[in-house]
Amino acid sequence: MKITKYEIDMLDVKSADAFLIHFYDDDDNDKDYIILVDAGNYNDGPTIANFIKNRYGRKNIDLAICSHCDKDHFGGFVWLLEQIRDNAPNRINISHFWVDDPADHVSLGMVKRIRTHDSLVVKARSVYDLGDNKNMLDILDELGNKKLIWTEPFSDAGKYSDKPYSVDAFDNHIEVLGPSVTYYEQLVPDFRNELKKKDYTTDENEDASITLIEGRVYSKTLDDAGDDPSSHNQSSVIFIFKPDDGKKFLFMGDAGRDAIDHFLYEEDKYKIKGIYWLKVPHHGSKYNMDNWMIDHLRPKNAFISTEKVGHYLSQAVVNALKKCDCKVCSTHKHGSVWHHCGTASRDDYSSIISFL
């Protein structure tokens, strides 16, 4: 497989995530493929389906990747999977689905007040539950391998040949860097389940000044913020998309510094040094991008899916990225954003004149 023509769409789903990678295989008469990375909230499902049909002229997704168990990332998948289960006439089919199942990575001895395996499975999987029998993992079980293939993405999948795990796709043009099985299993017992989600709002007037110290980015605000304490977020699937032009596109879900520190393979940290494009984690939160990360990644382009500055998005994160000569785009300012290489132009899209 050879990829030189591709496009990435960041859909405007407010404080949620929905990204599409659409690419062509030069070695197979420009056969095209679609990867959906997260699907926003439940009500974003129809928007995503219509976009795929109307923009790409397709009725199927080749690979769906759910980064982690927050409903602003998996909610739309529930809607899409329901359509497949119910054989809806306008459904978008999915060939392969990547998501980690917490129930397979926790045992009775790791948790309190649960005495049976069945109860443990229900409790562990509740993080993917929207209520009203809308549990994403249960629907995947219903569909089984007759409708789609479901595997769990881990950076060390090769060590578990007897497990339904994946480490890459499309001839390694998609490569999983995190989490490893070991790190994921450390996080699962601390998943929130029914606990209240942390409030990630920030002060719009916080210190957003950035300095360079011996060429390195420094923000006191980012230094003081500390890393995201959420096990949900740190468990996010981290992967890179690698077309054949040498550019690297890094997707991080809602992960933070701890997730990178727990890369199983040290060389994977160097794979993300000086990347071309970054899906900024957790809607631009200051708890998910510290000074070291920004200086190490130094992306040339950064996409942020968010609603407004102060609701997740930190101006300090934006300014630190800009200090590295990064072009920063956000749905709250630019709406849906399209990055492309070698694909046909779009009459209804225009070049961004003013970045953040």
Image: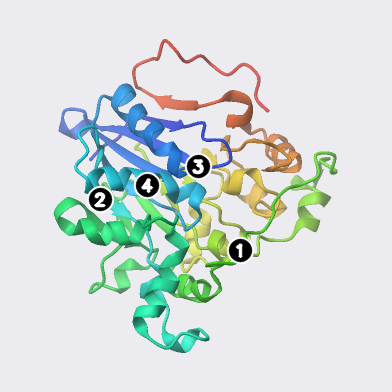
* Quarter placement of the C terminus: top right
Q: Quick one: SS at disc 3?
A: loop
Q: Quick one: SS at disc 2?
A: strand
Q: Which residue is mark 1?
A: 230
Q: Amino acid at mark 1?
A: Ser
Q: Nearer the viewer, mark 2 or mark 4?
A: 4
User: Who's the residue at 35% across and 44% down the image?
Assistant: 79
Q: Position of residue 345 (x, y in %)?
A: 38, 15
Label for residue 17? 3
Disc 1 to disc 4, how far (Cα)?
A: 22 Å
Mark 3 or mark 1, which has the lower sequence index? 3
Do residues under tags 1 and 2 come within 8 Å of each other at their CB atoms? no
Q: Which residue is mark 2?
A: 96
Mark 3 or mark 4, which has the lower sequence index? 3
User: Who's the residue at 27% across and 42% down the image?
Assistant: 83
Q: Relative to 193, is 2 above or below?
A: above
Q: Position of residue 7 (x, y in %)?
A: 39, 29
Question: Residue 329 lies in what quarter of the image?
Answer: top right
